Image (cartoon, helix red, strand yellow):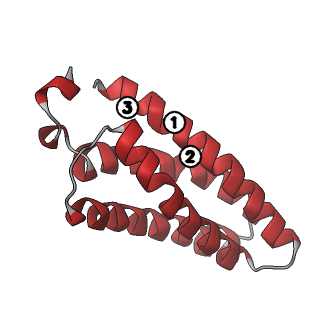
Amino acid sequence: MRTADQLVRFAIVGVASNAVLYMLYLAATEAGVEHKGAMTGVFALGILQTFLFNKNWSFRDRSTRASTFVRYMIAYSAAYGINLVAMLVLVDRYHFPDRGVQAVMIIVVALFLFAALRFWVFPASRRSFAEQE
């Protein structure tokens, strides 16, 4: 499968997932949950919800190795760290609005994650020859 096709599929999964998760983030912060706590909760939901979609549909990875999920968790942990640092610096230190920062970070984190998933978590070398066409 071509990288462009993977990117489109990843984007579909991401847009659907992030639309729901951002609404949950807004609801949580509106209900009084602190912005970093709300971001942490929706991030955890996002990891669980997207693993199977990205593995089986976006990247068509057929491996059954536990290391795939471990790599996925490491990639998402790094993405979480990027998102958390942005919240700490931009919201807590420089007082940008948390909802705007989180909206922008969805895009930043998505770009980071696509690269990590494409080249490290689900690399082309682990897919069959037929799936690479």
Q: Earlier in the sequence, mark 1 or mark 2?
A: 1
Q: Is residue 112 visible?
A: no
Q: Which residue is mark 1?
A: 11
Q: Residue furthest top?
A: 133
Question: In the rendering, at what x and y percent does residue 69 appear?
Answer: 31, 63
Quick one: SS at disc 1? helix
Nearer to us: label 1 or label 2: 1
Q: Out of 2 and 115, give the one closest to the viewer.
A: 2
Return the mark for residue 39. Answer: none
User: What is the crowding at mark 1: few (fewer than 14 residues within 10 Å), some, or many (at least 20)?
Assistant: some
Type of the residue with mark 1: Ala
Q: Residue at x 51, y 36 (%)?
A: 11
Type of the residue with mark 2: Ile
Q: Is residue 123 visible?
A: yes
Task: Judge from the rendering whether residue 11 lies leftward or rightward of residue 117; answer left or right.
Answer: right
Distance from the alpha carbon under mark 1 to that under mark 2:
10 Å
Q: Which residue is mark 2?
A: 107
Return the mark for residue 6. Answer: 3
Task: Judge from the rendering whether residue 20 lies leftward or rightward of residue 26; answer left or right.
Answer: left
Quick one: SS at disc 3? helix
Q: Residue at x 53, y 41 (%)?
A: 13
Q: Residue at x 21, y 64 (%)?
A: 67
Nearer to us: label 3 or label 2: 3
Q: Residue at x 28, y 25 (%)?
A: 1
Relative to residue 71, is residue 113 depicted above or below? above
